[in-house]
Image (spheres, helix red, strand yellow):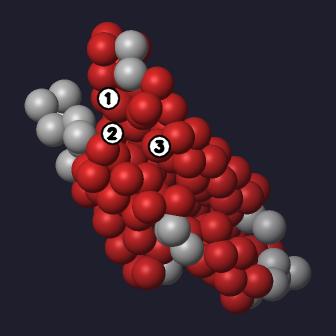
Amino acid sequence: MQPLLTEIKDLTKALAGLRSDNIVIDNLDRILAQVKGSDILNQLDQYKRSMPTVPEDEQALETYIETMNARADELNKEADHFLDELERIKTIRHTLNLEALDPIITEARKIIHSLHAFTAHLEEGS
């Protein structure tokens, strides 16, 4: 799970690197390339496939559910930081009416939606 958390932190840092005072094409291109080039979707898929099967024993199932919920909470915590940065960029986009930020926003939305879908999957215990 650590590679997932690291990837989310790196993506959050990339978004945090965009400020209203440094909106230049090179910076936008760099951030877009980092977000678009993220391997997070593949990492989520690999992590999902490597998860243990749901145990049938009631006590083991309880432990399994607690573990999955704890993992979801940890991922959601990092995803919340990423979402905060996305919302900040959306505010900049609307305030300055900069369509050049749209590709970054689109790619970041794909990532946050995938993260939320994955943590919902973990919380279901499946």
Where disc 2 sits, the SS reads: helix
Asked whether disc 2 touches disc 1, contact meaning CB atoms under 8 Å apart, the reply is yes
Q: Quadrant of the C terminus?
A: bottom right
List the single residue furthest toward the left: 21
Tell me if residue 83 comes above or below residue 57 in the rendering: above
Residue 12 quadrant: bottom left
Pick whichever, 126 or 38, lies toward us. Answer: 38
Where disc 3 sits, the SS reads: helix
Of the two numbered discs 2 and 3 in the rendering, the one whose residue sits closer to the viewer? 3
Can residue 25 be seen at all in this image of the molecule? Answer: yes
Asked whether disc 3 touches disc 1, contact meaning CB atoms under 8 Å apart, the reply is no
Pick whichever, 37 or 47, lies toward us. Answer: 37
Residue 29, given in percent of the width and then of the height, sits at: 37, 53
Q: Which residue is mark 1?
A: 88
* Residue at x 47%, y 73% (from the top left corner): 4
Of the two numbered discs 3 and 1 in the rendering, the one whose residue sits closer to the viewer? 3
Q: Which disc, if any, is residue 104? A: 3
Amino acid type at mark 2: Glu
- Does label 3 or label 1 sit earlier along the sequence? 1
* Residue at x 51%, y 68% (from the top left corner): 37
Q: CA distance from mark 3 to mark 1?
A: 12 Å
Asked whether disc 2 touches disc 3, contact meaning CB atoms under 8 Å apart, the reply is no
Q: Which disc, if any, is residue 85? A: 2
Tell me if residue 35 comes above or below residue 98 in the rendering: below
Can residue 60 be seen at all in this image of the molecule? Answer: no
